[in-house]
Image (cartoon, helix red, strand yellow):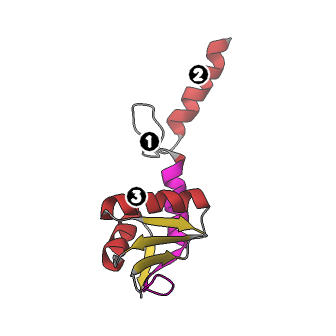
Amino acid sequence: MSSDWKDALAALKGNMPNDNTPDNGTVPSTESTHRQETSQQMPLTVLLDRKGRKGKTATIIEGFKADDTTVAETARILKQKIGTGGSSRGGEILLQGDWRERAATLLRDMGYKVRTI
């Protein structure tokens, strides 16, 4: 009796369209899929700021509508790839120095829409 539901499931699986899942049985992580879906919706602004920093330049990336953990993870990746310090809070990422072009390129590679000011 236990093989009946397995046979029915196998028949249904054979009728379903191919969804490009790997043959080894692993399923792509939903975190990266979720990041791609949310990143398509939010246009980010990359700008340079000196106010309130004693003349030191800082690259600000604003416009995130995702949760703080996604913003913090994106900031961590940017800081590692650029090799600079920074922080993330309140839906913004701050990178120390003028990294507008490099940050915009990396964000586009991650799937975000970016506008540089």
Q: Which residue is mark 2?
A: 7
Q: Secondary structure at mark 1?
A: loop
- The image shows residue 87 at horizontal and vertical percentages of 49, 65
| Measured Cα–Cα span from mark 1 to mark 3 | 26 Å
> Which numbered mark, 1 or 3, is in the foreground of this view?
3
Residue 38, picture quadrant: bottom right
Cα–Cα gap, marks 3 and 2:
45 Å
Residue at the spot of label 1: 21
Residue 97 belongs to magenta span: no
Label 2 or label 1, whichever comes before in sequence order:
2
In this picture, which residue range is highlighted in magenta?
31-54
Residue, far top: 1
Distance from the alpha carbon under mark 2 to that under mark 1: 21 Å
Name the residue: 65% across, 21% down.
5
| Nearest to the observer: residue 115 or residue 16 | 115
Q: Is residue 14 above or below residue 84?
A: above
Q: Which mark is residue 77?
A: 3
Q: 56 or 66, which lies in front?
A: 56
Q: Residue at x 47, y 75 (%)?
A: 61
Q: Which mark is residue 35?
A: none
Secondary structure under badge 2?
helix
| Amino acid type, label 1 | Thr
Residue under the image location 34 percent in, 79 percent down: 98
- Viewed as shown, does residue 108 lie left or right of 2? left
Residue type marked 3: Ile
